Image (tube, rainbow, N blue to C red):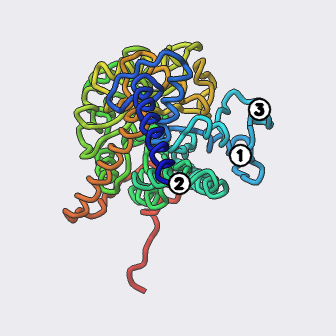
Amino acid sequence: MKGAGHSRVWKLTVTFFAIGSWMGRVGPRPADGELATLTSTRERLQTVHQVLKEVPLIDGHNDLPWNIRNFVHNQLNEFDFDKDLRQISPWSKSAWSQTDLLRLQQGMVGGQFWVAYVPCKSQYLNAVQLTLEQVDLIKRLIDKYSDYMEFASSSREILEAHSRGKIAGLIGVEGGHSLGSSLAVLRTLYQLGVRYLTLTHTCNTPWAKSSSVEEEDNGNGGGLTDFGKVVVREMNRLGMLIDLSHTARVTMRDALEVSKAPLIFSHSSAFSICNSTRNVPDDVLKQLAVNGGLVMVTFFNYFVKCGPDASVTDVAEHIYYIRNLIGVDYIGVGGDFDGINKTPRGLEDVSRYPELFAELLRSGKWNVEDLKKVAGLNLLRVFRQVEKVRDDMQKDGIRPLEILLDSPDTIGNCALDINSVQRLTEV
Ligand SMILES: [Zn+2]
């Protein structure tokens, strides 16, 4: 009886697997390298859901922390991130709000760079303090919602969080003005867990040029001063990702020349499709591939279509274009949610990422391995390489860089010029 039962179960199992593997040929989960010819939207979304369970989807840029400052003055006790914010004022009334935990889960986000951004207007004033407050806010946010999120400061920690079913929360600082031209501040931000710095936001810093103030005739060189190049090398030594979104083309080219590690664009798309200076021109994309870096394609309609209307198909066009130019290994996603007020149809908020990946499958030219790369494997590769450069520099005995910058940051109205303070060397 026992034996006979076993053999029947065995036959059933074999039949089941035979059907299962046959279904695998045409069903919703093609093998990794196989072209996905899935006919229905449902099948494509099923495949995407399976892929995003296997590999964390890591988004490069979300501005929620700035909205928390704007809307509730960083008072987290007034912020219910685990509720549907579309129903809660002031979030429900704002065109800039597209993020909450429930929608992040629906969107299968596995890792998020939360952005510690402070406005350029604070440069030479209290930019450093405000940045520290945003870093503190992000850490408190991750802590308050530890059932959903886990703080991550390395490639390994992203994967660990994902394996526990949590969203890995990372920190990026958007804008070199947040450093107050101080390598000590840069190192301290690293110690606090910051893992990327965007070299500029919409203002020049004393050491790097921004795309927003880029002159028509930008020639070659002149994007980073000598001190700017030192910032890049110190970031290499620390193991911090260098983000070139918002920088001038001359800055992009200088940074690509100086950096020993791969660079990223945390939220930029292809200039050839939409000629906004926030997008990346072809020659820089080609250099980025040589550098082994990553462009995390962004969703703001004005950078997707250079106008107020765009769709998920238009975002996919940027991805196809970059893939055709430099290959699939250098593409990621950086939605810029909560930092934009015009989102593409089909990509309205953080719950919609799977629609983008399903759209890529719809082309019939994408296999599962390609999807995994764009979702997170490419970012993980870049992050590991940045960590390796850090480790190699440490092995080579390279010490923290000590450069004296006669910085305008320390002679503003609101700063003490420390060099002017008389020190008594003898009593
Ligand atoms: Zn930005």
Residue highlighted by disc 3: 92
Q: Residue furthest bottom?
A: 427
| Quarter of the figure with residue 367 | top left
Mark 1: secondary structure: loop
Q: Please report the residue visible at 28 percent of the width from the left and 50 percent of the height from the top.
A: 233
Residue highlighted by disc 2: 164
Q: Is mark 1 within 8 Å of ligand 1?
A: no
Residue 109 in the figure: left or right of residue 399? right
Q: Nearer the viewer, residue 167 or 387?
A: 167
Distance, label 2 to label 3, CA atoms, is 31 Å
**Number of numbered discs visible in the structure rendering:** 3
Which amino acid, by three-letter code, is at mark 2? Arg
Q: Position of residue 254 (x, y in %)?
A: 27, 36
Residue highlighted by disc 1: 82
- Observer able to see residue 175: no
- Observer able to see residue 122: yes
Local crowd size for mark 1, using a 10 Å CA cut-off: few (<14), some (14–19), many (≥20) = few
